């Protein structure tokens, strides 16, 4: 199968996956014994008001009809309207999305760098000091609540040492017009060096907090797979052909070790997104996670549902992406 | 012509440190291989033959230690650093591994295996030239050069072993170690691969050390044969001598244990007992507990190597013959 | 089973500890059990142990740690130590209830799905896989948002996230056990399906259930802390570690570190303790590990 065909098949296979996820989210938000309208208006609202709100939101229709309405609405880009602001939910999500992308990408890069170099070093010196240190680091990172880790960084580097800004994405004093919504790129595109430095400073703490927590998982996976791959015949054969150590380690062993890691990256992604919700709240980062928490505080149910669906779509899209990268790296997947 | 030694191994000892104690995998082995000669190294699995192969390229596991001398191009490989070894591996000494399924990087195109190897040793060669060399090597082993753009898993087992051989020979090394090159292949393919190796050896004028447990394989290829038992080289001599006039009881037993195709020999003979524990090897001759001809001295004193009828034999049966080497006795 | 365990913090911490201290050491289990018992005692005897009432102003606001208040006081002048001690109540209660609910959903579904198979099995598996692949915390947030605050509601939100894990373990084991000879024999002598399920199959999958239960606790506590940090926990002024952390964050600029440090350390200690204990349970109940020793 050519790579193009593989990608097409993979995308087609994702369609039922998305439908199931959407139906599940829809059901869980409807079936569970709570009434969004009551929760929204409070128990004291008069009956007519409740009925009217129900009708407004289409909640008086039969469940399957509601679902199809919602489902086809999504296809047309209609995520419903926020009851808090009255704006289309999709517009609000679009505004928030780049902030989350910037944070998670930054965290992801940190995690991958630590994971690959730390994991390779640990594998190379299996059971020696670096390996043991890596294990203690991983235990610590697993046991620590991410938001608490963020709080401690905030306290230390933001408040006590005053090295980095405590929260937010950019200082209010800095004026600049976003283009893509990714401030790092925008500030560079605008040639605004001051803004760039400011944005990076804001990004370091939340990005590192999120990145370090994810990195321990990468580190373990890289280490364990590297130990396995380094014992394989083709590594010995490469050494026997006179290939240099670095080349053997990174070109032959690491690339092979990364293949199985990429297939389980879906789970790390879920963790990354969940971590992003907590990290964004800790650092007042104006992304999707803090949007979800904010809307919950105001019981804005269309927005909550929209945000959760949006997360679901992100999960599916990235899992497709991961599979495609995987197919490019490991030709055996395609056949 | 054949007087020139390509590689000379002197008093080689290899041991592995394990949790139960050091394992003496190879004990005081000496032999040499001449130019354009094929030496077959035969023995049961665990006898140390693969350790010897790996020790020449110094690709033994980390828990191992080597003593003795491995002389190649007037250098002692045992003392050589990793950087200098890298310059020898693949360029001057190559290795063909047992399992072609696992010895090629599964996510690298065959072409890239060649280009990488060539450019590592000869950075001055352009990528196009390297690819040409790879195509030549493929033609030499009988694979269509267009298959270079394939991944290893797209080739059959026999083809993969051909590709491995091409890869080992692409820089025209003067010495090739073939470690059980046909063990994992079908019988017909085995014969083809051996035939190929034989032809290539003539063509490229190289020396081969053929490591195998299969006496049938060495019979076809080797000029001389070394028989290993439990870390000792127990007999070494010309192939026809080993075959028709085996001196060591172990060699005899090994020859008898080959399943015979003649109808009158229906009985399969095997050697009683197991390989000795190499952490605490038996005193005296290591084969003595299993030897049908064992004498009192065999259990007490390690035999020196005697020269008998052109062969070298490590066995007390030949006491009185000329002693070629007797390091152990001198030591104590 | 291993693939399922990967979901749990406990599994990762446990295997790392085992790598460091060697397998089969009772020390890990012992320390874990000690921490667990310590916190259970804290929770049960909180009124006797805590020096002050955790919901009442007992001093000046934001007093740093002193002899009188060794963990300091929070913004409302409440004793942080007492709140940390009482916090164990909520954390452990919600964690235990959540784990029980998750098991109560996952186990029967797994038994039925694995035993009956066919289209029903496929549908349930599909749904469970969908939940499983979705970021757990976000799902719990959504459910908690609809259900509103309260111990049981939070526990349900957490349980929905982990039910698929129980389901997967049980379903896969049942699917492989149901064709074994002794089950066939029971069927041949005319045992009813329900009897076969409860008497022949359930006892065989029980060890795995116990392992998953014990591993699940640390994650449940972590999720609960996250939910209450986001303001989705139980209503104040009930002491809760996650809520106290989000409350303490408001005073991060006043450098009131004591309000942040101690509840966090409590969470970490409990998570480590539960992980160690569950590793011990895992090793004790997992015959393949025991054989290797």
Image: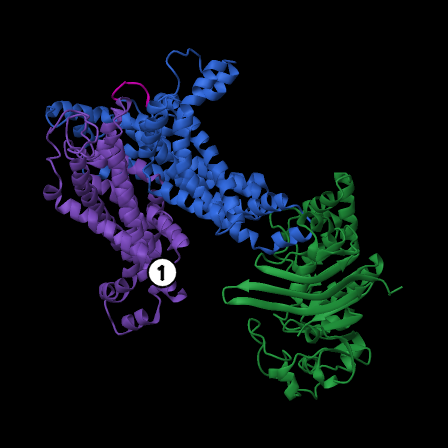
Q: Which chain is green?
A: B
Q: Is residue C96 left or right of residue B329?
A: left
Q: Position of residue B321 (x, y in %)?
A: 78, 83
Q: Position of residue C109 (x, y in %)?
A: 27, 53
Where does the C terminus of chain B fall, quadrant-wise?
bottom right
Q: Is residue A57 left or right of residue A276?
A: left
Task: Identify the magenta region.
Answer: A83-89
Does residue C195 lie above or below C117 as drawn?
A: below
Return the residue nearer the eye: A319 or B299: B299
Does residue C181 lie above or below A11 as drawn?
A: below
**Residue A185 magenta-drawn?**
no
Question: Taking the image as drawn, is residue A314 in sight?
Answer: no
Return the residue nearer the eye: A237 or A286: A237
Residue denoted by label 1:
C24
Q: Is residue A49 left or right of residue B83?
A: left
**What secondary structure is marked by label 1?**
loop
Count the marks: 1
Image colour for chain A is blue
- Chief SS of the magenta region: loop
Image colour for chain C is purple
Does residue A125 lie above or below A114 as drawn?
A: below
Q: Position of residue A310 (x, y in %)?
A: 36, 31
Q: Quadrant of residue C2?
A: bottom left
Q: Residue at x 39, y 33 (%)?
A: A210
Does residue A155 lie above or below B84 as drawn?
A: above
Q: Quadrant of residue C245?
A: top left
């Amino acid at each position: 199968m050519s790579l193009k065909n593989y990608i097409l098949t993979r995308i087609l296979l994702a369609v039922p996956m998305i439908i199931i996820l959407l139906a599940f989210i829809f059901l869980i938000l409807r079936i569970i014994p709570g009434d969004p309208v009551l929760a929204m208006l409070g128990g004291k609202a008069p009956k007519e008001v409740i009925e009217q709100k129900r009708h407004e939101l289409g909640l008086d229709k039969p469940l399957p009809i509601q679902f199809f309405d919602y489902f086809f609405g999504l296809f047309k880009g209609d995520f419903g309207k926020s009851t808090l602001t009255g704006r289309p939910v999709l517009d609000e999500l679009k505004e928030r999305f780049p902030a989350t992308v910037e944070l998670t990408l930054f965290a992801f890069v940190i995690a991958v760098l630590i994971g690959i170099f730390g994991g390779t070093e640990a594998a190379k010196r299996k059971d020696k000091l670096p390996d043991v240190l890596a294990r203690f680091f991983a235990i610590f990172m697993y046991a620590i609540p991410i938001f608490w880790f963020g709080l401690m960084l905030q306290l230390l580097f933001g408040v006590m040492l005053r090295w980095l800004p405590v929260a937010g994405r950019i200082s209010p004093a800095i004026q600049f017009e976003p283009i893509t919504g990714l401030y790092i790129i925008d500030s560079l595109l605008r040639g605004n060096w001051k803004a760039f430095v400011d944005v990076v400073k804001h990004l370091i703490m939340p990005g590192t907090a999120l990145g370090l927590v994810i990195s321990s998982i990468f580190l373990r996976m890289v280490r364990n797979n590297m130990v396995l791959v380094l014992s394989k015949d083709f590594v010995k054969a490469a050494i026997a052909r006179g290939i240099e150590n670095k080349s053997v380690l990174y070109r032959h062993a690491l690339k092979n070790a990364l293949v199985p890691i990429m297939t389980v990256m879906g789970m790390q992604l879920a963790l990354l997104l969940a971590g992003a919700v907590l990290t964004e709240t800790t650092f007042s980062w104006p992304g999707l996670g803090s949007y979800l928490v904010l809307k919950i505080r105001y019981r804005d149910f269309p927005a909550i549902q929209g945000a959760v669906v949006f997360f679901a779509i992100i999960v599916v899209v990235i899992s497709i992406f991961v599979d495609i990268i995987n197919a490019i790296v490991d030709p055996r997947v395609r056949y | 012509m054949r007087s020139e030694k390509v590689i000379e191994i002197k008093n080689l000892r290899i041991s592995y440190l394990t949790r139960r104690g050091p394992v003496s995998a190879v004990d005081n082995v000496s032999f040499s291989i001449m130019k354009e000669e094929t030496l077959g190294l035969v023995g049961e699995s665990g006898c140390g033959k693969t350790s010897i192969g790996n020790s020449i390229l110094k690709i033994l596991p980390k828990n191992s230690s080597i003593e003795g001398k491995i002389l190649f191009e007037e250098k002692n490989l045992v003392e050589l650093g990793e950087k200098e070894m890298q310059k020898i591996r693949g360029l001057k000494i190559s290795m063909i591994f047992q399992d072609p399924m696992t010895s090629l990087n599964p996510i690298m195109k065959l072409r890239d295996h060649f280009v990488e190897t060539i450019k590592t040793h000869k950075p001055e060669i352009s990528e196009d030239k390297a690819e040409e060399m790879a195509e030549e090597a493929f033609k030499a082993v009988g694979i269509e050069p267009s298959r270079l753009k394939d991944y290893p898993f797209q080739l059959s087992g026999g083809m993969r072993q051909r590709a491995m051989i091409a890869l080992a020979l692409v820089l025209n090394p003067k010495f090739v170690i073939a470690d059980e090159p046909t063990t994992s292949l079908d019988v017909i393919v085995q014969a083809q691969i051996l035939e190929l190796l034989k032809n290539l050896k003539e063509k490229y004028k190289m020396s081969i050390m053929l490591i195998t447990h299969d006496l049938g394989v060495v019979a076809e290829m080797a000029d001389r044969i070394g028989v290993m038992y439990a870390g000792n080289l127990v007999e070494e001599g010309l192939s026809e001598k080993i075959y028709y006039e085996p001196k060591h009881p172990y060699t005899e037993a090994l020859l008898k244990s080959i399943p015979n195709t003649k109808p009158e020999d229906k009985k399969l003979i095997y050697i009683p007992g197991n390989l000795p524990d190499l952490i605490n090897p038996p005193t005296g001759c290591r084969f003595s507990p299993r030897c049908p001809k064992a004498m009192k001295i065999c259990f007490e004193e390690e035999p020196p190597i005697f020269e008998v009828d052109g062969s070298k034999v490590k066995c007390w049966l030949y006491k009185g013959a000329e002693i070629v080497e007797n390091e152990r006795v001198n030591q104590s | 089973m291993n693939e399922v365990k990967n979901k749990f913090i406990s599994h990762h911490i446990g295997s790392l500890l085992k790598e460091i201290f060697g397998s089969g050491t009772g020390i890990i289990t012992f320390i874990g059990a000690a921490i667990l018992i310590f916190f259970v005692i804290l929770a049960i005897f909180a009124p006797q142990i805590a020096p002050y009432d955790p919901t009442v102003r007992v001093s000046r606001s934001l007093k740093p740690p002193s002899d009188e208040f060794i963990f300091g006081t929070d913004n409302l002048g409440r004793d942080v130590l007492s709140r940390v001690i009482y916090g164990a109540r909520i954390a452990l209660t919600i964690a235990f209830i959540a784990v029980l609910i998750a098991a109560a959903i996952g186990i029967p579904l797994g038994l039925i799905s694995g035993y009956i198979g066919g289209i029903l099995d496929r549908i349930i598996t599909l749904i469970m896989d969908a939940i499983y692949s979705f970021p757990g915390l976000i799902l719990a947030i959504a459910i908690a948002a609809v259900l509103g605050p309260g111990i049981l509601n939070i526990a349900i939100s957490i349980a929905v996230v982990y039910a698929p894990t129980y389901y997967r373990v049980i379903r896969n084991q049942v699917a492989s056990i149901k064709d074994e000879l002794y089950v066939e024999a029971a069927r041949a002598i005319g045992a009813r399906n329900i009897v076969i399920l409860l008497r022949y199959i359930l006892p065989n999958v029980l060890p795995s259930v116990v392992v998953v239960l014990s591993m699940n606790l640390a994650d449940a506590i972590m999720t609960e802390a996250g939910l209450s940090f986001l303001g989705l926990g139980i209503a104040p002024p009930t002491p809760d570690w996650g809520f106290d952390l989000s409350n303490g964050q408001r005073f991060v600029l006043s450098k009131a570190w004591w309000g942040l440090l101690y509840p966090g350390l409590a969470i970490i200690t409990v998570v480590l303790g539960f992980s160690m204990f569950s590793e011990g349970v895992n090793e004790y109940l997992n015959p393949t590990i025991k054989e290797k020793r």
